[in-house]
Image (cartoon, rainbow, N blue to C red):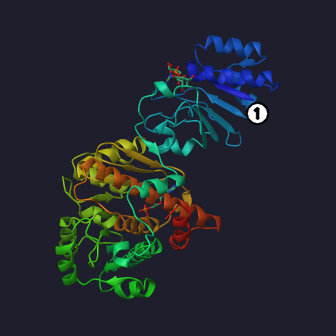
Amino acid sequence: MVGLIGSGNNGGDGLYAMAALAKRGVRCTAVLLGERTHPEALEDFNRAGGRSAYAMQLPGLLEDCDLLIDAVYGTGVRPGAVLPEIPQNIPVLACDLPSGVDADTGAVVPTVIAADRTVSFGALKTGLVVGSGHLVSGHIKVIDIGLRETLPAPEAWVAQGEDVELLLNRTSDWHVPGQHKYQRGVLGLFAGSPRYPGAAVLAARAAVSTGLGLLRTVVPDSVAPAMSGAVPESVPLSSQELTALLAHSRRNDREGAKRIGAWAVGPGLEDTPDNRETLAQILASESPCVYDAGALVMLEPGANPQPRILTPHAGELRSLLAKAGVRVDAADIADDPVRWARWAAVAYDCVILLKGSATICTAPDGYTLIVHSSTPDLATAGSGDVLTGLLGTLLAATSFPAKESETNLMHRLTDIAAAGALIHAHAGALAALEGTLSAVDLLRALPRAARDLGL
Ligand SMILES: NC(=O)C1=CN([C@@H]2O[C@H](COP(=O)(O)OP(=O)(O)OC[C@H]3O[C@@H](n4cnc5c(N)ncnc54)[C@H](O)[C@@H]3O)[C@@H](O)[C@H]2O)[C@@H](O)CC1
Ligand SMILES: Nc1ncnc2c1ncn2[C@@H]1O[C@H](COP(=O)(O)OP(=O)(O)O)[C@@H](O)[C@H]1O
């Protein structure tokens, strides 16, 4: 076993770990990379029979290495760190966090040492589950080292599959005996264009696959035949009907009347004057709404009374921020996605669900849930449309009391967003088990994923 040992406490941790292994008879060599080395830990390591080496000996040592312990930098890393290159075939175990990852943001230096496993001490660092840090952390295990009492309140929480029931039970009433379809949830879907007819269909199929009462669809004439063919459950909504319905839509007024309880807007939508007009009506309604893709292009920042979830990927987040006067580029977002998602949540007065290999759901007050246990198979065209339909159903099935405080409302929307991302991720994992994943495969796995997670 070879350890890369830095000059601080992270190096000390690596040496103590290798000392314990050396005592068990493991052949351990510590490559001392810093100008100084944690004195007590080095003494312990030497006493246990460990050997030390210089950086120039590293290539030779790696030729006969079963496991590399990375303990160069932990939470103390500063920008500009330069790290040795490690051949890909060598398994790497990172102490606390991979060297070169910023513990708070997930930013990484170009020479970051990617780990197969990371053993994180005391608490899960945000940088391990978001941004580029998430991509180099491997399997993460958090070890309690007795710090709990001294730690500050977390800035973000990781949400996992088993949390879905809790995230939704606080907000939703699923499968109540005696409910009729209007009480179960009516979703309006405004989506599609001649160029992107499939996006509307995917969102619609996702919505009805997740346990919706009724789906009303507002799609261009050119998309209507495909919609009724692929989603016979959907009921088209004409623009006259839409105007009349929106006049009656009220938050928390799902009972009895054939009203739209929530909206999903944007998959495949084009920026046209007619679409802007329809969008303006939906924006002015009080129904909770998820806005995605084409809808994001037409949104403006500012305070609003509507319960909203916006679901940008990083490129769309950059455009949203630019409209709000905040200039960032893709690298800025990759280096600190939580920060920029929070900026957008404040600027647009809504919950932001930032898509990517880790999904970040955040409210304007900073309440943040992260879904990082996802499969890269989800990176396929149409997968975001499925998420929008699914989120629409979750919103339509939720009661939003009129007198709820703004903070509570935003937190519940954040919970719903995270629950949607978890169901989406679980559906992706189920579909991936069967082989290559397309958005249609994802759709097929949705009902099972929703049931597995307690819907
Ligand atoms: N803070 C705590 O309460 C605990 C910390 N522990 C360990 O301590 C680690 C943090 O230790 P340290 O604060 O000593 O820092 P690190 O051990 O992460 O960093 C080592 C030193 O490297 C130097 N350094 C950082 N970036 C550099 C750069 N770009 N170029 C050149 N030198 C650079 C700095 O002087 C830094 O002190 C944690 O990751 C964890 O492993 C644990 O032992 C448990 C408790
Ligand atoms: N590398 C990845 N690992 C896990 N999930 C991913 C990855 N890349 C993208 N995703 C997820 O896949 C979905 C893609 O959505 P989006 O970019 O809107 O696609 P589309 O517009 O084609 O539907 C999002 O839910 C996102 O979080």
Image-quadrant location for residue 375: bottom right
Residue 91 screen position, x and y as percent:
70, 39
Amino acid type for the residue under numbered disc 1? Cys
Residue at image location 29% in from the left, 45% down from the top: 343
Q: Nearer the viewer, residue 384 or 393?
A: 393
Total marks placed: 1
- Residue 246 x, y percent position in the rendering: 20, 74
- Residue 347 falls left or right of residue 378: left
**Front-lying residue, 356 or 164:** 164
Q: Quadrant of the N terminus?
A: top right
Look at 21% across and 68% down and name the residue there: 250
Q: Nearer the viewer, residue 57 or 225?
A: 225
Residue 190 in view = no
Categorize mark 1 by other alpha carbons within 10 Å: few (<14), some (14-19), many (20+).
some
Q: Position of residue 349 (x, y in %)?
A: 24, 51
Left or right, 235 with reference to 404: right
Residue annotated with mark 1: 65
Q: Give the structural element (helix, strand or loop) at label 1.
A: loop
- Residue at 29% x, 70% y: name it: 261
Up-down relation of residue 57 to residue 231 (above or below):
above
Q: Position of residue 443 (x, y in %)?
A: 51, 72
Tell me if I can see residue 255 in this picture: yes
